[in-house]
Image (cartoon, rainbow, N blue to C red):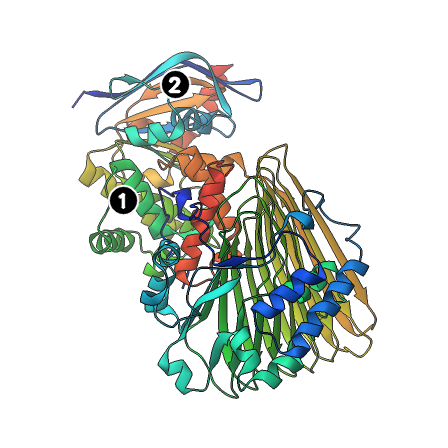
């Protein structure tokens, strides 16, 4: 798959950049106070422990400081952010026909119902703060796969499972925006794949933020039990506004013994978005986490998915591409923590910067004392498309055993004139030639994605190459 | 037959402020095969690059008319659309697009039409058979990990598929073993046979020419064409090398 990618032409920015009338049913005041948090909790009919959890998280939020490293987030003022916007829809439904026309149209333009019919085992669709659609195909449901919104799971038969896992991997004390998430989270998905179940088709959750000046704080909790396999895809986008929007989601992944979870993301937030997202996986003995990550949107991103290799022989792979264009400062990378013997991690990233964009690759590999005979390989390549853009690489390594094999490689380059000349000599325009080279550069991710997502990624690259500053 | 396709007049070219070509005159008529020979560093590849429009090659004076049109101001891709093709000495590796998709894209750019996948596949496979290329190469990323010989074959494959009016083969035979040279020249023969296209074969050896019909030979030394002849000039060079011409140029 991915080998036979067509070059897609004629991209229309309106594919992502359309605004629907703000017809929400309910929203909180701007800002962040205990009253607002209580209001959200009441609105969502939280169990008591969750209400307390939110209030406690808010305290942590007020206590914790902003990070003193990374891109500036001065343009983000929490007093102006609306943390909860309930869309004007019935409670989550399983039938697209029951989704209000406006919202349904949004997801159709993004191709979600079409993809669901074609190649997915289940879909969740979130609009602003709430899921409006969630469905899992019978074949998956019959195998015992649970795929639902967190809110239902909190009250249903999996309530205990949620309680014992929710924000245990990413506690609110982790950092300021994890605390914020704990206080005002809403929406997101819960997935449970039972022992030995191999799901042949991916599940996908799509997050759309339509409301101007709002935040989205969805929580994704996935548990893949012993020997099971899951490919989960998340997508996200928003129209562009001239005020700051905020995304502070949280993803917690539990990969059981000898289980494999592939987690793919194509992120295309609009360029007024502060994307302060936290993702973390813990992997048991012989299990494997595979992160596939494409970061294209947002004004500022802080994104470093972390893999904790807890069991012997656990493995993690991170394959990522980041494209920073005009007005974007994307600080991305990953963190690998080896906490058991014979564990391995493999990181391959590409970053591209253009039109003054700043792309920083930040990685951390920690090999603990007991993680004997572990291996880690980190490779990052950067491509700068002009003289005003910037690319930095900040790899950190903390190796506490002599018995480990660790490698790091970094390369920074530009598009070669020879390559452009070669492609143009076959009739491609300069723009197409350069876009093709950049797509090829990002092919480490492209070839890992299902075809239609690889096409979407190449579309995004072409869009960026056209210099659309939107 | 003597309908001019390419008319180069008084062409002088420099690269990085160094004058390479001086006052080149060359006329190629439709369907003709020209051979451009000369010792290393004579400026042969510079002529190919200048004709193709490589922006690193600066035209100091002279004119290039192709198919009745002055192409001096045209970009590389416009020249490609006019029907000029160059087989590269060192084809570039481009991950992310397969050889077959690349050729299809190039064809679609050229013709402005969508091309039916089924017909296209068949044509590519037929052309690959002529070149003794394993069909799996069509689905591999463009030139990535290809051996030197496979890269050259892939260039000839592109020539056969794109059907240019003028193909410039820049040292296509260099670095190839005897069998590969034979295969490549079979591809060139096919081009001569079917497409009535013109050729400029740039080479410093004569191996690729053994089985090809050559109309004109030009000897380039120190940036100047020092001798023009017919196909028999190739045989003379084969026997005596470039020495005579080099003394002549001094």
Quadrant of the rendered image containing residue A332 = bottom right
Q: Residue at x 36, y 37 (%)?
A: A426
Q: Is residue A453 left or right of residue A42?
A: left
Q: Are marks 1 and 2 in contact (CB under 8 Å)?
A: no
Q: Residue at x 52, y 34 (%)?
A: A417
Query: SS class of the residue under badge 2?
Result: loop
The reply to whether residue A331 is in sight is yes
- Label 1 crowding class (10 Å Cα cut-off): few <14, some 14-19, many 20+? some
| Left or right of residue A36, residue B11 in this image | left
Determine which quarter of the picture holds residue A311: bottom right
Residue depicted at x 50% and y 64%? A130
Q: Which of the labelled discs sits on residue A378, or is there none? A: none
Residue A199, above or below A459: below
Chain of the residue displaying label 1: B
Tell me residue A398's x, y (percent).
Answer: 81, 65
Q: Residue furthest left?
A: B1
Chain letter behind tag 2: B
Question: Which numbered disc flags the more N-terminal residue, 1 or 2?
Answer: 2
Instruction: Please state the horizontal and vertical placement of residue A404, each as a whole percent of the image.
Output: 76, 72
Q: Label 1 belongs to which residue? A: B161
Position of the N terminus of chain B, as image quadrant, is top left
In the rendered image, is residue A283 in sight?
no
Name the residue that disc number 2 marks. B73
The local secondary structure at tag 1 comes to: helix
Disc number lying in front (1 or 2): 2
Q: Nearer the viewer, residue A425 or A235?
A: A235
Please state the horizontal and vertical placement of residue B127, each as a whole percent of the image.
Answer: 26, 51
**Frontmost residue, B2 versus A415:** A415
Real-space Cα separation, disc 1 to disc 2, in angstroms: 27 Å
Q: For this rendering, which residue is in front, B102 or B163? A: B102
């Amino acid at each position: 798959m991915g080998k036979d990618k067509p070059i897609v032409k004629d991209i229309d920015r309106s594919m992502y950049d359309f605004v629907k009338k703000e017809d929400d049913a309910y929203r909180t005041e701007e800002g962040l106070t205990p009253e607002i948090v209580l209001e959200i909790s009441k609105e969502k009919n939280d169990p008591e422990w969750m209400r307390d959890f939110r209030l406690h998280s808010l305290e942590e939020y007020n206590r914790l400081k902003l990070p003193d490293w990374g891109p500036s987030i001065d343009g983000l003022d929490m007093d102006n952010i609306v943390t909860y916007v309930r869309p004007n829809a019935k409670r989550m439904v399983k039938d697209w026909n029951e989704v209000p026309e406006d919202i349904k149209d949004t997801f159709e333009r993004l191709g979600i119902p079409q993809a669901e019919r074609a190649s997915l085992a289940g879909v969740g669709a979130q609009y602003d703060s709430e899921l409006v659609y969630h469905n899992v195909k019978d074949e998956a449901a019959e195998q015992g796969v649970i795929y639902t919104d967190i809110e239902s799971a909190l009250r249903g038969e999996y309530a205990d499972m949620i309680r014992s896992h929710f924000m245990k991997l990413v506690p609110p004390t982790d950092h300021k925006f994890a605390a914020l998430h704990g206080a005002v989270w809403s929406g997101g998905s819960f997935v449970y794949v039972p022992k030995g179940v191999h799901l042949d088709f991916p599940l996908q959750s799509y997050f759309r933020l339509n409301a101007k000046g709002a935040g989205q704080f969805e929580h994704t909790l996935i548990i893949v039990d012993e020997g099971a396999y899951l490919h989960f895809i998340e997508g996200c986008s928003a129209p562009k506004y001239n005020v700051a929007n905020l995304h502070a989601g949280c993803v917690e992944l539990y990969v059981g013994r000898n289980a494999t979870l592939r987690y793919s993301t194509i992120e295309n937030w609009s360029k007024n978005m502060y994307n302060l997202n936290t993702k973390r996986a813990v992997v048991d003995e012989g299990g494997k986490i595979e992160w596939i990550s494409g970061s294209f949107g947002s004004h500022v991103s802080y994104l470093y998915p972390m893999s904790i290799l807890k069991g012997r022989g656990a493995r993690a792979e991170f394959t990522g591409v980041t494209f920073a264009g005009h007005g974007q400062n994307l600080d991305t990378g990953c963190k690998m923590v080896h906490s058991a013997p014979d564990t391995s991690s493999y990181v391959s990233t590409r970053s591209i910067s253009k039109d003054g964009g700043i792309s920083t690759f930040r990685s951390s590999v920690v090999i603990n004392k007991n993680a004997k005979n572990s291996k880690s390989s980190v490779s990052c390549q950067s491509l700068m498309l002009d003289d005003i853009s910037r690319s930095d690489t900040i790899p950190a390594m903390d190796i506490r055993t002599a018995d480990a094999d660790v490698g790091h490689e970094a390369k920074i380059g530009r598009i070669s004139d020879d390559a452009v000349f070669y492609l143009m000599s076959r009739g491609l325009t300069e723009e197409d030639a350069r876009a093709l080279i950049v797509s090829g550069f990002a092919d480490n991710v492209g070839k890992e994605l299902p075809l239609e997502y690889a096409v979407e990624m190449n579309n995004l690259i072409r869009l960026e190459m056209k210099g659309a500053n939107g | 037959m003597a309908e001019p396709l390419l008319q180069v007049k008084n062409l002088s070219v420099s690269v990085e402020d160094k004058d390479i070509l001086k006052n080149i005159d060359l006329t190629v008529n439709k369907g003709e095969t020209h051979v451009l020979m000369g010792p290393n560093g004579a400026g042969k590849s510079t002529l190919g690059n200048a004709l193709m429009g490589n922006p690193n090659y600066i035209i100091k004076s002279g004119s290039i008319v192709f198919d009745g049109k002055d192409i001096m101001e045209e970009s590389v891709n416009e020249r490609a659309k006019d029907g000029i093709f160059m087989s590269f000495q060192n084809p570039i590796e481009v991950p992310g697009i397969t050889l077959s998709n690349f050729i299809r894209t190039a064809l679609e750019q050229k013709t402005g039409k969508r091309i039916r996948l089924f017909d296209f596949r068949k044509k590519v496979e037929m052309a690959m058979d002529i070149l003794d290329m394993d069909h799996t190469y069509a689905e591999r990323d463009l030139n990535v990990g290809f051996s030197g010989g496979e890269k050259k074959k892939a260039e000839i494959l592109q020539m056969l598929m794109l059907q240019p009016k003028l193909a410039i083969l820049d040292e296509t035979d260099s670095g190839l073993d005897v069998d590969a040279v034979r295969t490549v020249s079979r591809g060139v023969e096919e081009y001569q046979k079917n497409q009535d296209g013109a050729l400029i074969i740039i080479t410093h050896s004569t191996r690729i020419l053994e089985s090809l019909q050559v109309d004109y030979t030009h000897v380039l030394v120190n940036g100047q064409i020092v001798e023009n002849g017919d196909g028999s000039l190739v045989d003379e060079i084969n026997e005596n090398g470039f020495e005579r011409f080099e003394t002549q140029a001094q």
